[in-house]
Amino acid sequence: MPTMPTIFVCGATGAQGGAMVNNLLKSNMKAQAIARDPSSKASQALQSAGATLFKGDFDDEDSLRQGMKGCTGLFLNLKPDLTDISRELVQAKRILSVAKEVGIQQVVYSSGFAVPEPQRLRYWDPNSFVANILLSKQAVEAEVRSAGFKTWTIIRPGSFMANMLPPHVHMMYAGLVDKGEFATALTPETVLPMIDTNDIGKFGAAAFGDPDRFHEKEFEIASELLGMDDLVKSLSRATGRHLKVNYLAEDEVDRQKATNPFLAGQQFARDMVQFVDMDEVRAWGIPLGTFEQFLEREKDRVAQAYCV
């Protein structure tokens, strides 16, 4: 009888990692992770669901070894450190090295849109802060390909629906919760490749369940293509509030983006949709969610966040 896959999940207490853990457990696989505080509410919820957590962090090799012991796969999911962009690559190398050392056979890396070919973006600036983030992930992708694992996969998710909720909504869409409106460098014509983190979990679990099918596959994933007006209208219906988006003039975007990396990122995102083919995403046969379904599933968090 084949051994049940056991996956080490990076960032398990976050939206993406948590979705990965939940989908692994639903697929009768095991999940292990490390957390700075295994007694936190998020950590306790994962353990109650069936995951195994150890105390540690990505800068501590010993805790990584403990967390990965007995694992067959690695879900690599790293958040850029906005104060030190180089840290993401350093951590990735450390995690991949320990994974090889303990005998992990498979890696699924969750990267990002445009990472292989960012120069295709209309507003690409190789010297910008946002570019440094994309180039860091590009370097991590190269590490995954060359690390020598038996099987590997790179998935590139779009814009997270979860960013419309705390804590990230206050940075990504400043003013939307407290004032009911926010300013953006996106345009009314911008179409965003939105992703429910639960769908990332579905793709990851599918890859760990069928390593050969997903070996050396690199692809973008989105749940639904939506404009910002569509997102705000859905949020307005879900919250009972009249929410509004203000599209900044181009000269205002240029004036602010040097000191506001989120505006710069939104300008980059204007033509991000070019990287995804929804027919190809659906061809994997994995059911995709919608923003309306996300809001319904997270209705308690939505109500709590937008009740002012």
Image: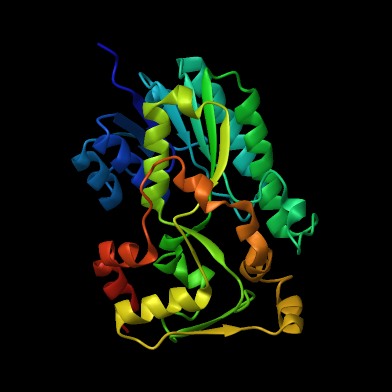
**Residue 228's x, y, as percent?**
52, 74
The mark total stands at 0
Q: Is residue 12 visible?
A: no
**Residue 221's x, y, as percent?**
51, 48
**Residue 118's x, y, as percent?**
72, 51
Question: Residue drawn at (61%, 56%), measured in percent from left and top?
Answer: 82
- Left or right? Give the position of 20 relative to 151: left
Above or below: residue 90 compared with residue 14: above
What is the quadrant of the C terminus in the image? bottom left
Above or below: residue 150 compared with residue 243: above
Q: Nearer the viewer, residue 105 or 291?
A: 291
Question: Residue drawn at (63%, 77%), measured in percent from left and top?
Answer: 187
Question: Residue drawn at (45%, 63%), measured in percent from left and top?
Answer: 163
What is the quadrant of the N terminus in the image? top left
- Left or right? Give the position of 129 relative to 298: right
Query: Colour scheme in the image?
Result: rainbow
Q: Is residue 193 visible?
A: yes
Residue at far top of view: 1
**Residue 207's x, y, as percent?**
43, 32
Q: Nearer the viewer, residue 236 or 18?
A: 236
Question: Residue drawn at (23%, 47%), measured in percent from left and top?
Answer: 45
Corner quadrant of residue 111: top right
Residue at far left of view: 48
Above or below: residue 217 compared with residue 244: above
